[in-house]
């Protein structure tokens, strides 16, 4: 196979890992919204922790993105 | 917010003019996908110090420094003036800065408690700095105005031909389909060879060197605050030898061995914090600017507006997350995790 074609395929396959981060963020926000609906007074603290959790879950997706970008634009 | 027709007028006119100019520019010069590379482009042919070239992200860093310092001076002046004038409500940009800092301060206070005066400056400084750096992406001319760089065609790199717009000012363009063969044969165009643009200013956070540097500063300061709060005992968090070192302790509390293993895991997680900090910021903003390039090269006039709005939001969130994570890690480091060891001693 052509090296350039393999690179494009590899970058695409690397991004499959973002499925996990998407599911994780969905679960996180689900929990946070349910928590806020039951106890609206706690919304500030819940939101802060939700953003923190999303940042951690998103980091995994960003690793995939960085790997894909490295495959595409380096070397 | 001014919702009357009069208040909207100047903004609407500017938008309309920009829209029409955009369409004219689109017809005259169709936009192209710029050259995308991970390392920052050097602006000087000779290295300035040792092996270091002046890169366009360094220029961006200096600009961000200047903007943040000017903001600080302006805010301090406005506060002094407001106090001297007797009314305590700052307006305009100072008001925006105050609102941001107040939100950050309240968040820090709710997490860090009595360490707020020590931790708040880091949170605020990192957030403001990264925010200004990220929002530079939204300014026209950043990432698009710069020096021409001749591409080494023999090495199989791909560039664009140039046209002279005014004396000394060139732009690169995509040759139309029917002329492509001519250009490759070198018969068309005033420009000899193939060119890229090395922009004068490239968004600071698309340089991995900067994000790794900032992550190192943040994580090292977390350790420093841990040592300030707990002294040398802080490192028992990572090397929990105090639980196992007279071996008689293991007989009393066999779980101490597990604590030793957990300590090593803590050490690894501390190192991975550097990785996740730097790649999160870099990945988000670099991907954002690539997205803007691609969308701008596909549909140049209206489509990019929505994505500029998205990048505005992403830049804000990423700056906030970087600062907030630093703050949370610092408050975890100063919180009394070593307390249970002390209880055992007394």
Image: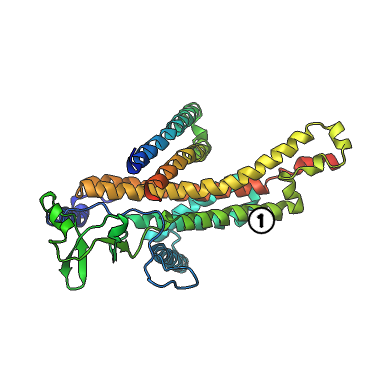
Query: Residue at image x 37%, y 49%?
Result: A73
Query: Residue at image x 74%, y 34%?
Result: B258
Direction from residue A19 to residue B233 in the image, left or right: right
Direction from residue A7 to residue B9 in the image, left or right: left
Q: Chain of mark 1?
A: B
Query: Residue at image x 66%, y 45%?
Result: B267
Looking at this view, name the residue that lies furthest to the right.
B248
Q: Nearer the viewer, residue A5 or A27?
A: A5
Q: Secondary structure at mark 1?
A: helix
Q: Give the number of marks.
A: 1
- Percent across and percent down for residue B141 are 28, 61
Question: What residue is disc 1 on?
Answer: B224
Query: Residue at image x 55%, y 58%?
Result: B121
**Quarter of the image where the C terminus of chain B is located:** top right
- Percent across and percent down for residue B23 are 14, 52
Q: Nearer the viewer, residue B258 or B192?
A: B192
Direction from residue B117 to residue B176 in the image, left or right: left
Vertical comparison of B30 with B56: above or below: above
Do we see residue A7 in this rendering?
yes
Q: Nearer the viewer, residue A24 or B92?
A: A24
């Amino acid at each position: 196979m052509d090296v350039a074609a393999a690179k494009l395929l590899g970058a695409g396959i690397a991004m499959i890992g973002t499925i996990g981060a998407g599911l994780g963020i969905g679960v996180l926000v689900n929990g946070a919204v349910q928590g806020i609906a039951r106890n609206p007074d706690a919304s500030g603290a819940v939101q802060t922790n939700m953003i923190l959790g999303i940042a951690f879950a998103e980091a995994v997706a960003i690793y995939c993105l960085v790997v894909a970008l490295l495959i595409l634009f380096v070397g | 917010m001014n919702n009357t027709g009069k208040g909207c007028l100047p903004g609407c006119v500017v938008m309309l003019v920009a829209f029409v100019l955009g369409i004219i520019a689109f017809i005259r010069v169709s936009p192209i996908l710029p050259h995308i590379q991970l390392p920052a482009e050097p602006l000087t042919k000779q290295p300035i110090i040792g092996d270091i070239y002046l890169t366009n992200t360094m220029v961006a860093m200096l600009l961000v420094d200047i903007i943040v310092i000017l903001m600080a001076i302006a805010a301090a002046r406005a506060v002094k003036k407001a106090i001297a004038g007797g009314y305590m409500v700052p307006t305009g940009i100072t008001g925006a800065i105050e609102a941001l800092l107040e939100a950050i301060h309240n968040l820090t206070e709710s997490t860090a408690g009595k360490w707020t005066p020590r931790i708040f400056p880091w949170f605020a400084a990192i957030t403001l700095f990264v925010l200004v750096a990220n929002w530079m992406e939204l300014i026209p001319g950043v990432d698009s105005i710069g020096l021409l760089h001749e591409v080494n065609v023999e090495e199989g790199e791909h560039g664009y031909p140039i046209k002279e717009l005014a004396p000394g000012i060139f732009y690169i363009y995509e040759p139309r389909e029917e002329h492509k063969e001519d250009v490759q044969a070198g018969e068309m165009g005033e420009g000899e060879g193939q060119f890229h643009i090395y922009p004068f200013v490239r968004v600071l956070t698309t340089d991995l060197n900067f994000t790794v540097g900032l992550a190192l500063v943040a994580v090292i300061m977390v350790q420093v605050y841990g040592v300030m709060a707990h002294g040398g005992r802080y490192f028992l968090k990572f090397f929990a030898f105090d639980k196992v070192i007279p071996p008689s302790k293991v007989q009393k509390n066999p779980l101490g061995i597990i604590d030793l293993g957990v300590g090593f895991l803590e050490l690894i997680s501390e190192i991975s914090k550097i990785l996740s900090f730097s790649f999160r910021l870099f990945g988000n903003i670099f991907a954002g600017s690539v997205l803007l390039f691609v969308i701008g090269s596909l549909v140049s006039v209206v489509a990019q507006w929505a994505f500029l709005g998205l990048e505005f939001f992403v830049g804000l969130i990423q700056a906030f997350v970087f600062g907030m994570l630093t703050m949370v890690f610092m408050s975890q480091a100063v919180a009394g995790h070593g307390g249970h060891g002390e209880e055992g001693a007394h």
